[in-house]
Image: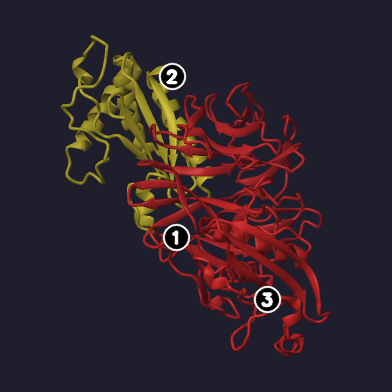
Amino acid sequence: MSARTFAPLLAAILLLAGPARAQLTIEIIGGGANQIPIAVLPFAGESALPQSITEIVEQDLSRSGRFRALFVGGITQVPAEISQVDFAEWKSRLADAMVIGQAQRLPDGKFEVRFRLLDVLKQSQIGSSAYTLSAGQIRLTAHKIADFIYEKLTGERGVFGTKIAYVVKHGSRFELRVADADGQNAQSMVISSEPIMSLAWSPDGTRMAYVSFQNKKPILFVQSLSASQQPAPVANYKGSNSAPAWSPDGKQLAAVLTKDGSSQIYLMNADGTNLRRITFSGFIDTEPFFTPDGRSIYFTSDRGGSPQIYRMPAKGGEAVRVTFEGDYNVSPRLSPEGKTLVYVSRNDGRFQVMAMDLGTRQIQTLTDGYRDESPTFAPNGRMILYATDVDNRGVLAAVSSDGRFRQRLSVQAADVREPSWGPFLGNQKAVTE
Amino acid sequence: MKKALLSALALALLYGCASQPTEPEKPSVAPAPSRAPVTTSPVQTPASSSIPSKRSVFYDYDKSDIKDEYRPILQAHGQYLAEHRGTKMLVQGNCDERGSREYNIALGQRRAEGVKRMLVLMGATGSQVEAVSLGEEKPRCTDHNEGCWSQNRRGDMLYGGEY
């Protein structure tokens, strides 16, 4: 993907390599429209924290493509309360919104952070919150603050507190990693000397289905993300076992097995029991993906002579063809509200992520790489993470669902691939006390 | 009778080719020809007492049909399996890196199933052969050009003990 093709070119390197291990580095390579100008001021007393919290908040907001973080230097006194804010000054700096706050160390060694989100034009408070946190919860708290601001100002849930998973290939070593949505705080969940692919989060975010070649052929596993149990094989039949997809209620898995001949779609309980076949085409049927209501499954099939995307009832039944343009349309994924289908098309030998509005059937090319693949929606539907390559090295990239804003994430000296964006976590570990 | 004659002819052709220096490439999985197969069959006919040396078939882009030039190879393996009923084989289908990883798993599977079907036609039993796919995940060659891709669009035959 060439950065030259994006205008305007911001090329702001927001996050540089993390401490001990190679973290994902994020580079913004496109500009969004209608960004909200916001001033995130340093919190009064913030130097008491082991790490700046407002820097992370500002990076989160910028990375979403929905905000433009304003320069906040040159102020003599950091306001801790609304009464100390010079609104005229921030209006002249063209801020629509601003964030102020204060931080302090508590007697028990924990920290307290309070912040206020202000409307500069109305000179009023939009919202506020307070958190008690330990030193290890700075990033988590910053993501929560960014999510609070995002939701108040856009009316939609933010995804800064969510997780992403991906596979890193380092020589002949494969790692399934889970990281914060900004690529930081990465943790290895599975390490193997054989390939790992097709990651799928359970809808509650507690388990990961994936395909491993550790037994010299594709076998489907489910790994708990909370406990350090051994991954359990849920489909290890004769032939190949791949392409897992969770039903929205988390009770069932769709997967592709070849035990009866060609690649066909089967349903099973999440533990692998109660297996039943739902496609009977004799052609390739693969890459199942449930609709949000759980009633239908989108999938890829070459039953019409070339790989195209189809939809069928989740219980089995007649399939309806969905894509018609081009001779290679694969990897269907639905937006969380079910209105947009993203998939990968081969266009003049290039593989690119496309978006189809399922209401109007209008199609848009979202990415401009040569080997873009494995698209995955953020749980708020606003961004799509995908795999691409730069100089023959696998990297992750993200594009806004309107195609206007892009960013690239990469791990130095490793191939990154197979992204999967995790769900909203209903019971995220509370930092408020 | 006629079939047996054809098989013998094909074998002769195959082994004839194998000794020539213009051999396109050696499969990385190929063991030394003298390596004994893992077998419980006591029958060892002189015609096929060792495992045929050629282990790979190659495909065109997006295709899974077996080209005529590879039929003698499959005939030799099919006959070997027919004569060694206790011998198991794993057929691995592979693809080049272009396109969806999961679709390539399915395409590699179709390639492997095609090899298996041909082996059964040539005398092997279905239960001797397992067809699996490695998709694009285990490339033999890692450059991003047709020279490499053509090597990676491949079906490999591995005998019991080799995988």
Residue type at mark 1: give it.
Gln
Pick whichever of labels 1 and 3 is earlier in the sequence: 1
Please report contact status of discs 1 and 3: CB closer than 8 Å, yes or no.
Answer: no
Q: Position of residue A203 (x, y in %)?
A: 66, 41
Q: Residues within 10 Å of mark 3 (few under 14, many from 20)?
A: many
Residue B40 lies, with reference to residue A214, above or below; the image says: above
Which chain is indicated by disc 1?
Answer: A
A171 to the left or right of B115:
left
Q: Nearer the viewer, mark 2 or mark 3?
A: 3
Instruction: Give how far apart the Cα atoms at labels 1 and 3 are.
Output: 33 Å
Which chain is indicated by disc 2?
Answer: B
- Which label was assigned to residue B126? 2
Q: B109 or A66, which lies in front?
A: A66
Instruction: Give how far apart the Cα atoms at labels 2 and 3 are.
Output: 76 Å
Q: Residue furthest top?
A: B42
- Chain painted red: A
- Chain painted yellow: B
- Which label was assigned to residue A431? none
**Helix, strand or loop status at disc 1:** loop
Q: B127 or A45, which lies in front?
A: A45
Query: Which corner quadrant of the image does residue B69 belong to?
Result: top left
The lab-note entry on whether marks 1 and 3 share a chain reads: yes
Q: Position of residue A319 (x, y in %)?
A: 73, 37
Q: Mark 1 highlights which residue?
A: A23
